[in-house]
Image: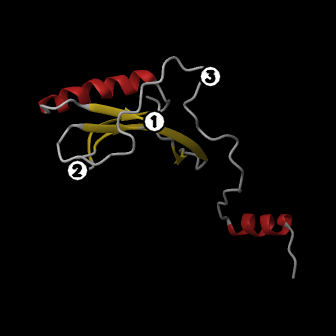
Amino acid sequence: MDVNKEKVQRIVQKLGLQVTPFTRKSRKYSSYEGTIRRIAPNKIHRRFNTCIPHQKITTDTTEFKYYNVDDKGRMTIQKLYPDPFMDMFNSEIIRYGIDKRPSAQNVMNVLNEAIEITSDCVYRRIFHSDRG
């Protein structure tokens, strides 16, 4: 038995269910904003493991979506952009920042805090990101 979407919609409304329609992503998040100045050389070359604490620190900005329900019961999609700094010695997040917009200022604030935390390393430290 075939049922069209209007019939399903009437049943859903009658039962008072909340349905989120399927939509394709309009665009994928990308931090690329045109011509980049100078890209830093890749000093890690996929050798992420280390036996020295605070020697290799990695970071990347990610987009997370979540639903927010207001006082009238309406659902809206919200976004958060976390910036974690992870020590490759033990995969510990040493510092992170979260913002509602991807911004260089947020990354730089967290980077300065991570530099202070890792200052006890006697070897040269490497802060690695996919953007150099």
Is residue 55 found left or right of 45 in the rendered image? left
Instruction: Please say whether residue 121 is visible from this viewpoint.
Output: yes
Which residue position holds label 3?
34
Which residue position holds label 2?
90
Kind of residue at disc 2: Asn
| Camera-side residue of 109 and 76 | 109
| Camera-side residue of 50 and 120 | 50
- Label 1: few (<14), some or many (≥20) within 10 Å? few
Helix, strand, or loop for circle 1?
loop
Q: State the image coordinates of residue 49 (x, y, percent, origin top left).
A: 28, 49
Q: Residue at horizontal 48%, vertical 19%?
A: 38
Kind of residue at disc 1: Asp
Is residue 17 found left or right of 86 in the rendered image? right
Kind of residue at disc 3: Gly
Q: State the image coordinates of residue 71 (x, y, percent, origin top left).
A: 53, 45
Q: Calculate the distance from the C-alpha at mark 2 to the C-alpha at mark 3.
A: 35 Å
Q: Residue furthest bottom?
A: 1
Vertical position of residue 17 compared to residue 125: above or below: below
Which residue position holds label 1?
130
Compare marks 2 and 1 and give the one earlier in the sequence: 2
Total number of numbered discs in the rendering = 3
Q: State the image coordinates of residue 37 (x, y, percent, origin top left).
A: 52, 17
State the quadrant of the N terminus.
bottom right
